[in-house]
Image (cartoon, rainbow, N blue to C red):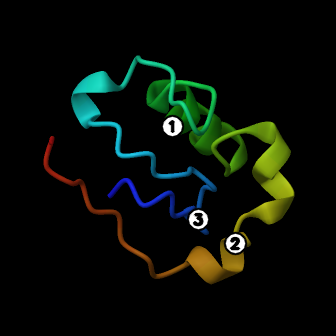
Amino acid sequence: RGRRDTCPVCYWEDDGQDLGEIDDVSSANHITLRQGRKNFARMGAADEAAVSLVAPASELRGLRREHRANG
């Protein structure tokens, strides 16, 4: 966490922001995590500019989603 790694699935940059700050604007992503999640559900990427950069749906099949603990 917080190493500025970028997720190949949604293109969210991990700036170390905690889940308790889901409505705070991310310094790296310039939107809130809540908005990034809504964007991902709607278009498959954290924001519109990243749609062409994320892994295609065919590569995502078989992946499972895991919730991480807060903090």
Q: 6 or 63, which is in the foreground?
A: 6
Q: Are marks 2 and 3 in contact (CB under 8 Å)?
A: yes
Could you tell me how many numbered marks the image carries? Answer: 3
Q: Quadrant of the C terminus?
A: top left
Q: Of label 3 and label 1, which has the lower sequence position?
A: 3
Q: Which secondary structure lies at badge 2?
A: loop
The x, y position of residue 43, in whole percent, is: 72, 44
Q: Quadrant of residue 66?
A: bottom left
Q: CA distance from mark 2 to mark 1?
A: 16 Å
> Of the residues shown, which amino acid type is indicated by label 2?
Ala
Residue occupying the point 46% across, 52% down? 14
> Of the residues shown, which amino acid type is indicated by label 3?
Val
Q: Quadrant of residue 49?
A: top right
* 10 w.r.t. 15: above or below: below
The x, y position of residue 54, in whole percent, is: 72, 64
> For the residue carrying disc 2, how many other residues have a C-alpha within 10 Å: few (<14), some (14-19), or many (20+)?
some
Q: CA distance from mark 3 to mark 1?
A: 12 Å
Mark sitting on residue 55:
2
The x, y position of residue 45, in whole percent, is: 67, 49
Write down the residue under mark 3. 9
> Of the residues shown, which amino acid type is indicated by label 1?
Arg
The x, y position of residue 51, in whole percent, is: 80, 53
Write down the residue under mark 1. 37
Q: Of label 2 and label 3, which has the lower sequence position?
A: 3
Q: Quadrant of the N terminus?
A: bottom left
> For the residue carrying disc 1, how many other residues have a C-alpha within 10 Å: few (<14), some (14-19), or many (20+)?
some
